[in-house]
Image (cartoon, rainbow, N blue to C red):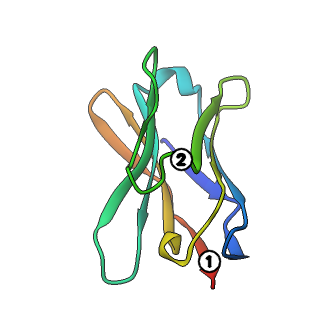
Amino acid sequence: QVLLVESGGGLVQAGGSLRLSCAVSGSIFNFSLLGWYRQAPGKQRDLVARITRGVSPDYADSVKGRFTISRDNAKNRVYLQMTSLTPEDTAVYYCYAQRFSVDYWGQGTQVTVSS
């Protein structure tokens, strides 16, 4: 069973920073795609950032230059460093992984940015 567990969410003022962490059960080498999505109240779940082996990371236009996705293969973790946060970044953030065309999701972590 694949488990993804997010942490690091919370309440932050506009302009602040947070780092989200996703602990992945098993070796992250086994996953072809790792990433972060977010879902704001009343909205669909949207891609924030994703990373694949040997390819530069992808970012949503709204977070380019502010968010950075990274992976630590030794710790089997995926991170999302978020800076210059705005209230529009408020959402539940989900960790995502894909292996053999099967998608896996974490439970989500709430990020709230106050103005």
Marks 1 and 2 in Cβ contact (< 8 Å): no
Residue for point 38% across, 50% down: 61
Please name the amino acid that badge 2 sits on. Leu
* Element on which disc 2 rests: loop
Q: Is residue 41 left or right of residue 78?
A: left
Where is the C terminus found, in terms of image quarters? Answer: bottom right
Q: Report the Cα–Cα distance between label 1 and label 2.
A: 27 Å
Q: Earlier in the sequence, mark 1 or mark 2?
A: 2
Q: Is residue 47 left or right of residue 106?
A: left
Residue 29 position within the rendered picture, expressed as x and y whole percent measured from the top left: 53, 20
Residue toward you, 27 or 44:
44
Q: Which mark is residue 76?
A: none
Q: Which residue is mark 2?
A: 3
Residue for point 52% across, 64% down: 108
Q: Is residue 53 left or right of residue 42?
A: right
Question: Does 107 appear above or below 1?
Answer: below
Residue toward you, 7 or 68:
68
Q: Which residue is mark 1?
A: 113
Q: Is residue 106 left or right of residue 113?
A: left
Residue 46 position within the rendered picture, expressed as x and y whole percent measured from the top left: 33, 59
Residue 80 position within the rendered picture, expressed as x and y whole percent measured from the top left: 61, 47
Residue toward you, 14 or 81:
14
Residue for point 33% across, 64% down: 45
Please name the amino acid that badge 1 sits on. Val
Question: Does 108 appear above or below 91?
Answer: above
Residue toward you, 42 or 3:
42
Q: Residues within 10 Å of mark 2 (few under 14, many from 20)?
A: some
Question: Does 98 appear above or below 44?
Answer: above
Residue for point 65% across, 32% down: 76
